[in-house]
Amino acid sequence: MNRKEITVFEDLLGSNKKIANELRHYLRAKGIFTINLMSSPGSGKTSLIEKLIDHLWPQHPLAVIEGDIETDLDAARIRAKGVPAWQITTGGACHLEAKMIARIIREIPEKTEFLFIENVGNLVCPASYDLGENLRFVLLSIPEGEDKPLKYPKAFLTAQGLIITKIDLLGPISFDLDKVKEEARKINPTLVIFTTSSRTGEGIKEFATYLIQQRQRFQENNA
Amino acid sequence: MNRKEITVFEDLLGSNKKIANELRHYLRAKGIFTINLMSSPGSGKTSLIEKLIDHLWPQHPLAVIEGDIETDLDAARIRAKGVPAWQITTGGACHLEAKMIARIIREIPEKTEFLFIENVGNLVCPASYDLGENLRFVLLSIPEGEDKPLKYPKAFLTAQGLIITKIDLLGPISFDLDKVKEEARKINPTLVIFTTSSRTGEGIKEFATYLIQQRQRFQENNA
Protein backbone atom coordinates (compact mmCIF):
# COMPACT_ATOMS: atom_id res chain seq x y z
CA MET A 1 0.00 0.00 0.00
CA ASN A 2 1.20 3.53 -0.70
CA ARG A 3 0.89 6.34 1.86
CA LYS A 4 -2.52 7.49 0.58
CA GLU A 5 -3.92 3.95 0.76
CA ILE A 6 -2.50 3.44 4.25
CA THR A 7 -4.11 6.66 5.48
CA VAL A 8 -7.50 5.61 4.11
CA PHE A 9 -7.07 2.16 5.67
CA GLU A 10 -6.19 3.62 9.07
CA ASP A 11 -9.15 6.01 8.96
CA LEU A 12 -11.33 3.04 8.13
CA LEU A 13 -10.00 0.94 11.01
CA GLY A 14 -10.35 3.88 13.41
CA SER A 15 -13.99 4.42 12.53
CA ASN A 16 -14.59 0.65 12.61
CA LYS A 17 -13.15 0.47 16.13
CA LYS A 18 -15.45 3.27 17.29
CA ILE A 19 -18.57 1.52 15.98
CA ALA A 20 -17.30 -1.83 17.35
CA ASN A 21 -17.02 -0.31 20.82
CA GLU A 22 -20.58 0.99 20.60
CA LEU A 23 -21.71 -2.46 19.50
CA ARG A 24 -19.83 -4.08 22.40
CA HIS A 25 -21.54 -1.71 24.85
CA TYR A 26 -24.98 -2.46 23.39
CA LEU A 27 -24.46 -6.24 23.33
CA ARG A 28 -23.21 -6.29 26.92
CA ALA A 29 -26.22 -4.30 28.08
CA LYS A 30 -28.50 -6.83 26.40
CA GLY A 31 -26.63 -9.86 27.76
CA ILE A 32 -25.79 -11.06 24.26
CA PHE A 33 -22.49 -12.96 24.21
CA THR A 34 -20.98 -12.64 20.75
CA ILE A 35 -18.62 -14.95 18.92
CA ASN A 36 -16.91 -13.94 15.68
CA LEU A 37 -15.91 -16.96 13.55
CA MET A 38 -13.14 -16.50 11.01
CA SER A 39 -11.63 -18.95 8.53
CA SER A 40 -10.84 -19.82 4.93
CA PRO A 41 -13.77 -20.62 2.66
CA GLY A 42 -14.95 -24.14 3.36
CA SER A 43 -13.39 -24.69 6.79
CA GLY A 44 -16.81 -25.54 8.16
CA LYS A 45 -18.05 -22.39 9.91
CA THR A 46 -21.70 -22.85 8.99
CA SER A 47 -21.63 -26.57 9.79
CA LEU A 48 -20.12 -25.82 13.19
CA ILE A 49 -22.88 -23.30 13.95
CA GLU A 50 -25.53 -25.83 12.84
CA LYS A 51 -24.09 -28.40 15.24
CA LEU A 52 -23.80 -25.87 18.08
CA ILE A 53 -27.47 -25.03 17.57
CA ASP A 54 -28.30 -28.68 18.26
CA HIS A 55 -26.61 -28.34 21.65
CA LEU A 56 -27.69 -24.81 22.62
CA TRP A 57 -31.13 -24.27 21.08
CA PRO A 58 -33.76 -23.60 22.35
CA GLN A 59 -32.59 -23.60 26.01
CA HIS A 60 -30.08 -20.90 25.12
CA PRO A 61 -31.70 -18.48 22.67
CA LEU A 62 -29.30 -17.53 19.95
CA ALA A 63 -29.06 -15.62 16.71
CA VAL A 64 -26.72 -15.81 13.75
CA ILE A 65 -25.33 -13.23 11.36
CA GLU A 66 -23.88 -14.68 8.18
CA GLY A 67 -21.32 -12.78 6.12
CA ASP A 68 -20.65 -13.61 2.50
CA ILE A 69 -19.57 -11.88 -0.67
CA GLU A 70 -22.64 -13.22 -2.45
CA THR A 71 -25.71 -15.42 -1.79
CA ASP A 72 -27.82 -16.06 1.30
CA LEU A 73 -27.22 -19.82 1.25
CA ASP A 74 -25.75 -19.85 4.78
CA ALA A 75 -28.51 -17.84 6.47
CA ALA A 76 -31.03 -20.15 4.81
CA ARG A 77 -29.26 -23.16 6.36
CA ILE A 78 -29.51 -21.61 9.82
CA ARG A 79 -33.14 -20.50 9.39
CA ALA A 80 -33.99 -24.06 8.40
CA LYS A 81 -33.24 -24.92 12.03
CA GLY A 82 -35.73 -22.35 13.28
CA VAL A 83 -33.01 -19.97 14.47
CA PRO A 84 -33.15 -16.26 13.59
CA ALA A 85 -30.47 -15.46 11.04
CA TRP A 86 -29.45 -12.45 8.98
CA GLN A 87 -27.39 -12.57 5.85
CA ILE A 88 -24.99 -9.76 5.06
CA THR A 89 -23.69 -9.85 1.49
CA THR A 90 -20.69 -7.58 1.14
CA GLY A 91 -20.82 -7.49 -2.67
CA GLY A 92 -17.05 -7.84 -2.99
CA ALA A 93 -15.53 -6.88 0.38
CA CYS A 94 -13.59 -9.73 1.94
CA HIS A 95 -14.62 -9.07 5.55
CA LEU A 96 -17.47 -7.87 7.73
CA GLU A 97 -17.26 -4.42 9.31
CA ALA A 98 -18.81 -3.21 12.54
CA LYS A 99 -21.14 -0.84 10.70
CA MET A 100 -22.69 -3.80 8.82
CA ILE A 101 -23.44 -5.50 12.14
CA ALA A 102 -24.76 -2.24 13.61
CA ARG A 103 -27.46 -2.05 10.93
CA ILE A 104 -28.91 -5.39 12.08
CA ILE A 105 -28.24 -5.46 15.79
CA ARG A 106 -31.52 -3.93 16.97
CA GLU A 107 -33.52 -6.64 15.18
CA ILE A 108 -32.06 -9.36 17.40
CA PRO A 109 -34.78 -10.69 19.73
CA GLU A 110 -34.81 -9.87 23.46
CA LYS A 111 -33.28 -12.55 25.70
CA THR A 112 -30.89 -13.74 23.03
CA GLU A 113 -27.92 -15.24 24.88
CA PHE A 114 -25.53 -15.93 22.03
CA LEU A 115 -24.86 -14.18 18.76
CA PHE A 116 -22.68 -16.03 16.28
CA ILE A 117 -21.17 -13.91 13.54
CA GLU A 118 -19.83 -15.95 10.67
CA ASN A 119 -17.33 -13.77 8.91
CA VAL A 120 -16.63 -13.84 5.15
CA GLY A 121 -14.53 -16.89 4.24
CA ASN A 122 -11.06 -15.41 4.32
CA LEU A 123 -8.03 -15.85 6.58
CA VAL A 124 -6.66 -12.37 5.95
CA CYS A 125 -8.94 -9.34 6.01
CA PRO A 126 -11.41 -10.26 8.79
CA ALA A 127 -8.53 -10.29 11.32
CA SER A 128 -8.28 -6.48 11.07
CA TYR A 129 -11.93 -5.72 11.87
CA ASP A 130 -13.26 -5.70 15.41
CA LEU A 131 -17.00 -6.45 15.37
CA GLY A 132 -17.59 -5.80 19.07
CA GLU A 133 -17.41 -9.52 19.81
CA ASN A 134 -16.59 -11.18 23.14
CA LEU A 135 -14.64 -14.00 21.54
CA ARG A 136 -12.99 -14.43 18.21
CA PHE A 137 -12.31 -17.96 17.01
CA VAL A 138 -10.34 -18.96 13.96
CA LEU A 139 -11.20 -22.28 12.32
CA LEU A 140 -8.65 -24.45 10.57
CA SER A 141 -9.79 -27.64 8.85
CA ILE A 142 -7.60 -30.70 8.53
CA PRO A 143 -7.58 -30.63 4.68
CA GLU A 144 -6.19 -27.07 4.66
CA GLY A 145 -2.82 -28.27 5.89
CA GLU A 146 -0.41 -27.70 8.73
CA ASP A 147 1.26 -24.54 7.51
CA LYS A 148 -1.61 -22.12 8.03
CA PRO A 149 -0.69 -20.66 11.47
CA LEU A 150 2.75 -19.63 10.16
CA LYS A 151 1.30 -18.28 6.93
CA TYR A 152 -1.62 -16.36 8.43
CA PRO A 153 -0.30 -15.29 11.84
CA LYS A 154 -2.61 -12.29 12.27
CA ALA A 155 -5.74 -14.43 12.29
CA PHE A 156 -4.23 -16.61 15.02
CA LEU A 157 -2.79 -13.66 16.92
CA THR A 158 -6.04 -11.70 17.15
CA ALA A 159 -8.22 -14.70 18.06
CA GLN A 160 -8.86 -16.02 21.56
CA GLY A 161 -9.31 -19.52 20.27
CA LEU A 162 -8.66 -22.01 17.50
CA ILE A 163 -11.04 -24.74 16.38
CA ILE A 164 -9.44 -27.49 14.34
CA THR A 165 -12.35 -28.81 12.26
CA LYS A 166 -13.02 -31.91 10.14
CA ILE A 167 -10.98 -33.94 12.59
CA ASP A 168 -12.63 -37.09 11.15
CA LEU A 169 -10.43 -36.60 8.07
CA LEU A 170 -7.26 -37.18 10.11
CA GLY A 171 -7.23 -40.74 8.81
CA PRO A 172 -7.28 -40.14 5.05
CA ILE A 173 -5.19 -36.94 5.37
CA SER A 174 -1.81 -36.63 7.06
CA PHE A 175 -1.79 -33.69 9.49
CA ASP A 176 0.46 -33.28 12.51
CA LEU A 177 -2.02 -32.07 15.11
CA ASP A 178 0.56 -31.50 17.85
CA LYS A 179 2.82 -29.49 15.56
CA VAL A 180 -0.05 -27.23 14.47
CA LYS A 181 -1.13 -26.63 18.07
CA GLU A 182 2.45 -25.83 19.04
CA GLU A 183 2.96 -23.42 16.13
CA ALA A 184 -0.36 -21.71 16.77
CA ARG A 185 0.57 -21.26 20.44
CA LYS A 186 3.97 -19.88 19.46
CA ILE A 187 2.07 -17.07 17.72
CA ASN A 188 -0.51 -16.73 20.49
CA PRO A 189 0.36 -18.52 23.75
CA THR A 190 -3.10 -18.02 25.32
CA LEU A 191 -5.02 -19.58 22.43
CA VAL A 192 -7.77 -21.98 23.57
CA ILE A 193 -7.88 -24.96 21.21
CA PHE A 194 -10.77 -27.29 20.37
CA THR A 195 -10.83 -30.15 17.88
CA THR A 196 -14.18 -30.89 16.28
CA SER A 197 -15.95 -32.83 13.60
CA SER A 198 -19.33 -31.64 12.41
CA ARG A 199 -19.78 -34.99 10.70
CA THR A 200 -19.23 -37.22 13.75
CA GLY A 201 -20.12 -34.59 16.37
CA GLU A 202 -16.75 -34.93 18.11
CA GLY A 203 -15.83 -31.96 20.29
CA ILE A 204 -19.03 -29.98 19.63
CA LYS A 205 -20.53 -30.51 23.07
CA GLU A 206 -17.25 -29.48 24.72
CA PHE A 207 -17.20 -26.28 22.70
CA ALA A 208 -20.87 -25.53 23.48
CA THR A 209 -20.20 -26.08 27.21
CA TYR A 210 -17.18 -23.79 27.04
CA LEU A 211 -19.30 -21.04 25.46
CA ILE A 212 -21.99 -21.37 28.14
CA GLN A 213 -19.32 -21.09 30.85
CA GLN A 214 -17.63 -18.12 29.18
CA ARG A 215 -20.92 -16.28 28.92
CA GLN A 216 -21.75 -17.03 32.57
CA ARG A 217 -18.39 -15.72 33.73
CA PHE A 218 -18.78 -12.62 31.60
CA GLN A 219 -22.27 -11.96 33.00
CA GLU A 220 -21.00 -12.35 36.57
CA ASN A 221 -18.11 -9.98 35.96
CA ASN A 222 -20.49 -7.39 34.54
CA ALA A 223 -23.25 -7.81 37.13
CA MET B 1 -16.27 1.23 0.58
CA ASN B 2 -16.99 4.96 0.64
CA ARG B 3 -16.32 7.21 -2.32
CA LYS B 4 -12.75 8.08 -1.23
CA GLU B 5 -11.86 4.42 -0.78
CA ILE B 6 -13.37 3.49 -4.15
CA THR B 7 -11.33 6.21 -5.87
CA VAL B 8 -8.10 4.94 -4.31
CA PHE B 9 -9.02 1.37 -5.26
CA GLU B 10 -9.74 2.34 -8.86
CA ASP B 11 -6.46 4.27 -9.11
CA LEU B 12 -4.71 1.20 -7.78
CA LEU B 13 -6.36 -1.16 -10.26
CA GLY B 14 -5.63 1.26 -13.10
CA SER B 15 -1.94 1.39 -12.28
CA ASN B 16 -1.88 -2.39 -11.71
CA LYS B 17 -3.37 -2.96 -15.17
CA LYS B 18 -0.72 -0.75 -16.75
CA ILE B 19 2.13 -2.70 -15.12
CA ALA B 20 0.37 -6.02 -15.92
CA ASN B 21 0.28 -5.08 -19.60
CA GLU B 22 4.00 -4.28 -19.56
CA LEU B 23 4.62 -7.64 -17.88
CA ARG B 24 2.51 -9.42 -20.51
CA HIS B 25 4.50 -7.79 -23.28
CA TYR B 26 7.82 -8.78 -21.67
CA LEU B 27 6.74 -12.37 -20.98
CA ARG B 28 5.45 -12.84 -24.52
CA ALA B 29 8.72 -11.54 -25.97
CA LYS B 30 10.62 -14.06 -23.84
CA GLY B 31 8.32 -16.97 -24.71
CA ILE B 32 7.35 -17.43 -21.07
CA PHE B 33 3.80 -18.78 -20.75
CA THR B 34 2.39 -17.67 -17.41
CA ILE B 35 -0.27 -19.27 -15.25
CA ASN B 36 -1.78 -17.48 -12.25
CA LEU B 37 -3.18 -19.93 -9.66
CA MET B 38 -5.82 -18.64 -7.26
CA SER B 39 -7.65 -20.38 -4.43
CA SER B 40 -8.50 -20.50 -0.74
CA PRO B 41 -5.68 -21.32 1.66
CA GLY B 42 -5.05 -25.05 1.59
CA SER B 43 -6.71 -25.94 -1.71
CA GLY B 44 -3.48 -27.51 -2.88
CA LYS B 45 -1.82 -24.92 -5.13
CA THR B 46 1.75 -25.74 -4.10
CA SER B 47 1.12 -29.49 -4.26
CA LEU B 48 -0.30 -29.12 -7.76
CA ILE B 49 2.79 -27.19 -8.90
CA GLU B 50 5.04 -29.85 -7.35
CA LYS B 51 3.22 -32.55 -9.29
CA LEU B 52 3.26 -30.53 -12.52
CA ILE B 53 7.02 -30.16 -12.11
CA ASP B 54 7.32 -33.96 -12.16
CA HIS B 55 5.64 -33.96 -15.59
CA LEU B 56 7.21 -30.84 -17.13
CA TRP B 57 10.70 -30.55 -15.66
CA PRO B 58 13.40 -30.49 -16.97
CA GLN B 59 12.22 -30.95 -20.61
CA HIS B 60 10.13 -27.80 -20.21
CA PRO B 61 12.12 -25.25 -18.18
CA LEU B 62 9.91 -23.53 -15.68
CA ALA B 63 9.99 -21.08 -12.82
CA VAL B 64 7.66 -20.41 -9.90
CA ILE B 65 6.70 -17.28 -8.00
CA GLU B 66 5.09 -17.96 -4.65
CA GLY B 67 2.87 -15.38 -2.95
CA ASP B 68 2.14 -15.49 0.74
CA ILE B 69 1.38 -13.10 3.56
CA GLU B 70 4.26 -14.54 5.58
CA THR B 71 6.95 -17.28 5.34
CA ASP B 72 8.90 -18.72 2.41
CA LEU B 73 7.75 -22.29 3.08
CA ASP B 74 6.25 -22.69 -0.39
CA ALA B 75 9.25 -21.43 -2.36
CA ALA B 76 11.43 -23.78 -0.29
CA ARG B 77 9.21 -26.71 -1.35
CA ILE B 78 9.65 -25.81 -5.03
CA ARG B 79 13.40 -25.20 -4.73
CA ALA B 80 13.74 -28.63 -3.14
CA LYS B 81 12.82 -29.96 -6.60
CA GLY B 82 15.65 -28.01 -8.21
CA VAL B 83 13.29 -25.52 -9.84
CA PRO B 84 13.98 -21.77 -9.57
CA ALA B 85 11.46 -20.17 -7.24
CA TRP B 86 10.93 -16.72 -5.74
CA GLN B 87 8.91 -16.01 -2.65
CA ILE B 88 6.95 -12.78 -2.37
CA THR B 89 5.70 -12.09 1.14
CA THR B 90 3.08 -9.38 1.08
CA GLY B 91 3.26 -8.68 4.80
CA GLY B 92 -0.49 -8.39 5.13
CA ALA B 93 -1.90 -7.80 1.65
CA CYS B 94 -4.25 -10.56 0.55
CA HIS B 95 -3.20 -10.69 -3.11
CA LEU B 96 -0.23 -10.29 -5.43
CA GLU B 97 0.04 -7.17 -7.56
CA ALA B 98 1.71 -6.77 -10.94
CA LYS B 99 4.39 -4.50 -9.49
CA MET B 100 5.52 -7.28 -7.12
CA ILE B 101 5.97 -9.61 -10.10
CA ALA B 102 7.73 -6.87 -12.07
CA ARG B 103 10.48 -6.63 -9.44
CA ILE B 104 11.39 -10.29 -9.99
CA ILE B 105 10.68 -10.88 -13.64
CA ARG B 106 14.14 -10.08 -15.01
CA GLU B 107 15.74 -12.70 -12.76
CA ILE B 108 13.86 -15.52 -14.51
CA PRO B 109 16.33 -17.61 -16.53
CA GLU B 110 16.45 -17.43 -20.33
CA LYS B 111 14.51 -20.21 -22.12
CA THR B 112 12.00 -20.58 -19.34
CA GLU B 113 8.84 -21.92 -20.94
CA PHE B 114 6.38 -21.76 -18.06
CA LEU B 115 6.01 -19.40 -15.15
CA PHE B 116 3.63 -20.47 -12.42
CA ILE B 117 2.47 -17.71 -10.09
CA GLU B 118 0.87 -19.04 -6.93
CA ASN B 119 -1.26 -16.23 -5.58
CA VAL B 120 -1.91 -15.56 -1.89
CA GLY B 121 -4.42 -18.07 -0.49
CA ASN B 122 -7.63 -16.12 -0.88
CA LEU B 123 -10.72 -16.48 -3.08
CA VAL B 124 -11.55 -12.78 -3.05
CA CYS B 125 -8.84 -10.18 -3.59
CA PRO B 126 -6.58 -11.92 -6.15
CA ALA B 127 -9.46 -11.96 -8.66
CA SER B 128 -9.15 -8.17 -9.08
CA TYR B 129 -5.44 -8.09 -9.95
CA ASP B 130 -4.16 -8.88 -13.43
CA LEU B 131 -0.58 -10.14 -13.20
CA GLY B 132 0.07 -10.21 -16.94
CA GLU B 133 -0.67 -13.94 -17.05
CA ASN B 134 -1.76 -16.00 -20.07
CA LEU B 135 -4.08 -18.19 -18.06
CA ARG B 136 -5.75 -17.82 -14.72
CA PHE B 137 -6.93 -20.96 -12.96
CA VAL B 138 -9.00 -21.11 -9.82
CA LEU B 139 -8.60 -24.19 -7.61
CA LEU B 140 -11.42 -25.64 -5.55
CA SER B 141 -10.73 -28.62 -3.31
CA ILE B 142 -13.34 -31.24 -2.51
CA PRO B 143 -13.31 -30.49 1.27
CA GLU B 144 -14.16 -26.83 0.69
CA GLY B 145 -17.68 -27.70 -0.37
CA GLU B 146 -20.01 -27.28 -3.28
CA ASP B 147 -21.19 -23.74 -2.64
CA LYS B 148 -17.99 -21.89 -3.55
CA PRO B 149 -18.73 -20.91 -7.18
CA LEU B 150 -21.96 -19.20 -6.10
CA LYS B 151 -20.29 -17.53 -3.13
CA TYR B 152 -17.14 -16.34 -4.89
CA PRO B 153 -18.34 -15.70 -8.45
CA LYS B 154 -15.64 -13.18 -9.36
CA ALA B 155 -12.85 -15.74 -8.98
CA PHE B 156 -14.71 -18.10 -11.32
CA LEU B 157 -15.70 -15.33 -13.70
CA THR B 158 -12.21 -13.94 -14.22
CA ALA B 159 -10.50 -17.35 -14.58
CA GLN B 160 -10.12 -19.32 -17.80
CA GLY B 161 -10.15 -22.58 -15.93
CA LEU B 162 -11.13 -24.45 -12.79
CA ILE B 163 -9.17 -27.26 -11.20
CA ILE B 164 -11.14 -29.36 -8.75
CA THR B 165 -8.42 -30.72 -6.44
CA LYS B 166 -8.19 -33.47 -3.81
CA ILE B 167 -10.54 -35.58 -5.91
CA ASP B 168 -9.33 -38.64 -3.94
CA LEU B 169 -11.40 -37.32 -1.00
CA LEU B 170 -14.65 -37.76 -2.96
CA GLY B 171 -15.19 -41.01 -1.07
CA PRO B 172 -14.99 -39.75 2.53
CA ILE B 173 -16.60 -36.41 1.64
CA SER B 174 -19.90 -35.90 -0.13
CA PHE B 175 -19.55 -33.45 -3.01
CA ASP B 176 -21.74 -33.21 -6.09
CA LEU B 177 -19.15 -32.85 -8.83
CA ASP B 178 -21.66 -32.39 -11.65
CA LYS B 179 -23.56 -29.72 -9.76
CA VAL B 180 -20.38 -27.73 -9.04
CA LYS B 181 -19.26 -27.93 -12.66
CA GLU B 182 -22.69 -26.80 -13.80
CA GLU B 183 -22.81 -23.87 -11.35
CA ALA B 184 -19.27 -22.80 -12.23
CA ARG B 185 -20.19 -22.86 -15.94
CA LYS B 186 -23.33 -20.85 -15.24
CA ILE B 187 -21.01 -18.09 -13.99
CA ASN B 188 -18.45 -18.62 -16.73
CA PRO B 189 -19.62 -20.77 -19.67
CA THR B 190 -16.14 -21.06 -21.24
CA LEU B 191 -14.43 -22.38 -18.11
CA VAL B 192 -12.08 -25.31 -18.81
CA ILE B 193 -12.40 -27.83 -15.96
CA PHE B 194 -9.88 -30.38 -14.71
CA THR B 195 -10.19 -32.75 -11.76
CA THR B 196 -6.96 -33.70 -10.04
CA SER B 197 -5.47 -35.39 -7.02
CA SER B 198 -1.93 -34.54 -6.02
CA ARG B 199 -1.96 -37.59 -3.78
CA THR B 200 -2.86 -40.18 -6.40
CA GLY B 201 -1.63 -38.20 -9.40
CA GLU B 202 -5.04 -38.33 -11.10
CA GLY B 203 -5.54 -35.68 -13.77
CA ILE B 204 -2.08 -34.09 -13.40
CA LYS B 205 -0.71 -35.41 -16.69
CA GLU B 206 -3.83 -34.22 -18.53
CA PHE B 207 -3.39 -30.72 -17.10
CA ALA B 208 0.35 -30.67 -17.94
CA THR B 209 -0.45 -31.74 -21.51
CA TYR B 210 -3.09 -29.04 -21.77
CA LEU B 211 -0.56 -26.39 -20.66
CA ILE B 212 2.02 -27.56 -23.21
CA GLN B 213 -0.62 -27.36 -25.95
CA GLN B 214 -1.84 -23.95 -24.85
CA ARG B 215 1.72 -22.58 -24.86
CA GLN B 216 2.35 -24.06 -28.30
CA ARG B 217 -0.77 -22.49 -29.71
CA PHE B 218 0.10 -19.16 -28.14
CA GLN B 219 3.63 -19.26 -29.56
CA GLU B 220 2.27 -20.07 -33.04
CA ASN B 221 -0.22 -17.21 -32.88
CA ASN B 222 2.56 -14.83 -31.89
CA ALA B 223 5.19 -16.09 -34.31
Image: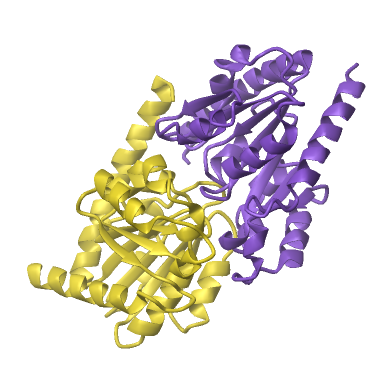
Chain colours: A purple, B yellow
Rendered image quadrant of residue A104 = top right
Q: Say which quadrant the C terminus of chain A sits in.
A: top right
Q: Position of residue B67 (x, y in %)?
A: 47, 59
Residue lying farthest to the bottom in this orientation:
B59
Q: Give the residue drawn at x 42%, y 72%.
A: B49
Front residue (pair B126, A213): A213
Rendered image quadrant of residue B209 = bottom left
Q: Position of residue B103 (x, y in %)?
A: 39, 60
Residue A129 visible from this viewpoint? no
Q: Position of residue B173 (x, y in %)?
A: 52, 60
State whether residue B107 is above or below residue A52.
below
Rendered image quadrant of residue A14 = top right
Tell how many labels: 0
Q: Going by the image, does A210 lie left or right of A102?
A: right
Front residue (pair A115, B20): A115
Front residue (pair B41, B126): B41
Q: Position of residue A206 (x, y in %)?
A: 80, 46
Q: Going by the image, does A213 lie left or right of B40?
A: right
Q: Give the residue drawn at x 69%, y 48%.
A: A156
Q: Give the residue drawn at x 49%, y 57%.
A: B174
Residue B75 visible from this viewpoint? yes
State whether residue B163 is above or below residue A89.
below
